Image (cartoon, helix red, strand yellow):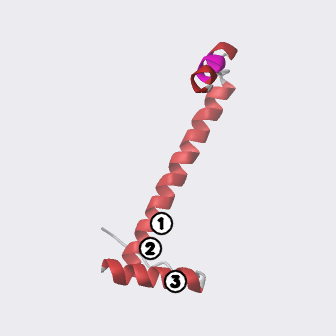
Amino acid sequence: MDSATLTLRVPMELKDQLDKLAEATHRTKSYLAGEAIRKYLDLEAWQVGEIQQALKEADEGDFASADDVAAIMKKYEA
């Protein structure tokens, strides 16, 4: 896998947490930071995709009917 160097500034508290986690897990700080960035990017990409899909459906007028909403709400009434 190709890799690149990324330099960034983080609060000292975050660096300390990363140092401790790297020591406890016997992983490098680079590995842990890379995994954290990967998970963040995956989550953000998923959220953006879901929002874009919802906007498309809304633009097409694809909404739940009042009866659909009432049926769902009835399931959660105490």
Could you tell me the amino acid type at mark 1?
Ile
Residue at point 60%, 39% (across, down): 52
Q: Which residues are magenta?
A: 68-72
Gap in Å between the C-alphas at discs 1 and 2? 6 Å
Structural distance between the alpha carbons of marks 2 and 3: 10 Å
Residue under the image location 33 percent in, 70 percent down: 2
Which residue is disc 2 drawn over?
33
**Outermost top residue:** 67
Q: Report helix, strand or loop for mark 1.
A: helix
- Residue at label 3? 15
Residue drawn at the location 60% of the way across and 17% of the way down? 71
Ranked by sequence position, the earlier of labels 1 and 3 is 3
Between the C-alphas of marks 1 and 3, the distance is 15 Å
Residue 54 in picture, x, y percent from top left? 61, 33
In the foreground, 76 or 58:
76
Question: Circles 1 and 2: CB distance less than 8 Å?
Answer: yes
The verdict on residue 45 being magenta is no
Query: Given the image, on which type of amino acid does mark 2 rest?
Result: Ala
Check the picture and name the quadrant holding the C terminus.
top right
The crowding category of the residue bearing disc 2, from other C-alpha atoms within 10 Å (few below 14, some 14 to 19, many at least 20), is: few
Identify the image quadrant of residue 39. Answer: bottom left
| Principal secondary structure, stretch drawn in magenta | helix
Label 1 close to label 3 by CB (< 8 Å):
no
Residue 11 versus residue 1 in the image, above or below:
below
Which residue is tagged 1? Answer: 37
The part of the image, by quadrant, that contains residue 58 is top right
| Residue depicted at 50% across the width and 53% down the height | 43
Q: In the figure, is residue 28 to the left or right of 69? A: left
Position of residue 75 relative to residue 1, above or below, is above
Mark linked to residue 12: none
**Coordinates of residue 63 in the picture (x, y in percent):** 65, 22
Of the residues shown, which amino acid type is indicated by label 3?
A: Lys
